Amino acid sequence: MKIHLLSLLFVVNCFSQSNIVNTNEWHFNSNSNGVSLEKWYSENSKETSNTIIVATLDTQIDLDHEDLKNQIWINEKEIPNNGIDDDKNGYIDDRNGWNFIGVGNNNIQAFSNFEFVRFIKKNKDLFQGRDSLKYINTPLYREYKRALKKYESEYNYYTEYLKAEGILISAYYPAKDTLKYYFPKEDYTTRQLDSLYQIHKTNNKTFVERVNNNDPSREFPDLIFYMKMIKKLNFTIEQMENSSKHKDSIVKKLLNFDYDDRIRIKNHHLEKGYGNNSLDSHERLKKHNTEVSSIIIANRNNNKGVKGFHNNIQVMPLIISPFGDEHDEDIANAIYYAVDNGARVINMSFSKEFSLNQKIVTTALQYAEDKNVLVVHTSGNASSNIDLTTFYPTDFNYTNSTEIVNNLITVGSISKRTDSTMVSPFSNYGKNNVDLFAPGEDIYVAIPDNQYTYDSGTSLAAPMVSGTAALIWLYYPNLTVQEVKKIILESGVTIDKMVVKPGTENELVHFSELCKSGKILNTYNAMKMAEEMSKKKKNKNID
């Protein structure tokens, strides 16, 4: 696989963050595809004493973040750190939630196989044994072949990436030392380096070509060009080395058939109590849930960072997401925990292309529906049509093209652009399997250590819907989960235009071909519709 140098340099950037306060949260405004939350607040003066819990099935979270710390769910029935299951719910000292990938008292299973690796491991003997021919036309075999193809693609990508990245890292100090001859104080600018490069460049093989061919040899012009790019993109050797270590972990753990990601987690299918109550012990695993939760619950009154949907919403952090893919047992158990401990909305900002035991997740989703709980799921970031390529968890039965449950909303990402490029290019889509789109690109969010940044992904679109659902139930608790789902989908803004299909440069399709509703989320409209529906139900009960 050929890797262009500039693309490689861009990917290895860890993006330094700054602690700034943003005043232009476009996603809550009424223009540029925003959800019009601030418009609703400008017209609504009614207070509510109700509270509502949104469970986030996600990574760990920064519990002490200035914008989140007063909005985290507290299990009042549990006496903290006494080693006793006070509320008899099967989990000891679950004061703020639970870590289903916890190990020991305060550790975590940080790395996990990709699900397609686990799928191949589980089915390898079946399809490579002497009876394999009789399975060759089965759906399971087709999934196995798809998993093999995915593994080959990912393995080749990361191993080639590692080789190329190694060349980049090995060039850093030679480039730095060589340039000291011209710049003893190392105070060169990109313009000076570019001028020097123009003088010394040759028509021989370029540094980019050498990187693409894993050629470690270096010429003086290469070193100048290399340092120019490093300088221009503000990279450090520490960032590149950390990136390389992470890719190495992917190859040695996530893609390794011999890596046992459950050896320290002794759970037996759907038993309760495995894991621990440590929700913020791993520094590199706190960012994602902190971002997701900040969209839902960030304090609206502290004049810091970002604003959430309402200060009466609480987040229940349920940790299931490592570096790698989630286990279906953890997903199902987290859903049961959320429902049994009072969550009305479950946000699932994760997805995976394979599932070893989707049936137990489906059963958990059905349990949530029976208990009047809404589940919101990200569509994924692969620019794929998920009507054709499954992304789990899902409420769709691909065998007979029907919905399994009616309490799940799958969300794609929209940008603030209003032209034909309005759909985020990374977003998955699907006429049957994506319900609607919501803001998920260039979203201002909280990150650990009281900092803030912009980020993008369908992971950020899903909590827009979760926050809206929570707001609806705060004010109109008499609505059912099916009614809340109906309100969110039907009250959205219809997009009647041709748009660029994700994953293509300029292929135009009608927006209605990308999701079931043909709409984008609008919280203002949803609250108005919820008010009307709630009144009708009350009047009907009175009559």
Image: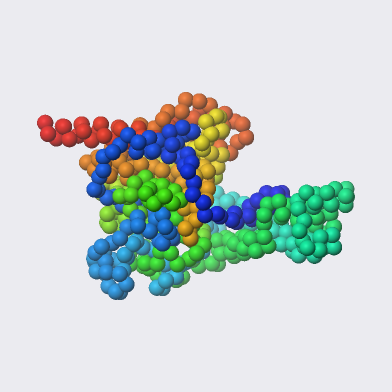
Relative side of 244 to 445, left or right: right
Check the image and report above or below for 251 versus 378. below
Q: Quadrant of residue 89?
A: bottom left
Residue 40 point in image, percent of width and height: 35, 36
**Image quadrant where one finds the C terminus:** top left
User: Residue visible at 81% across and 63% down?
Assistant: 184
Q: Residue furthest top?
A: 496
Residue 151 point in image, percent of width and height: 58, 54
User: Residue visible at 45% across and 43% down?
Assistant: 461
Relative side of 152 to 470, left or right: right
Q: Residue furthest front?
A: 303
Q: Quadrant of residue 187?
A: bottom right
Relative side of 341 to 25, left or right: left
* Residue nearest the observer in this picture, 13 or 206: 13
* Residue nearest the observer in this picture, 52 or 338: 52
User: Residue visible at 51% across and 38% down?
Assistant: 415
Residue 202 point in image, percent of width and height: 88, 50
Check the image and report above or below for 403 versus 96. above
User: Residue visible at 43% across and 36% down?
Assistant: 29
Q: Residue furthest left?
A: 543
Q: Does residue 306 appear in the picture of this structure?
A: yes
* Residue nearest the observer in this picture, 185 or 118: 185
Q: Does residue 486 appear in the picture of this structure?
A: no
Mark count? 0
Check the image and report above or below for 375 versus 322. above
Q: How is the image coloured?
A: rainbow
Check the image and report above or below for 421 versus 247. above
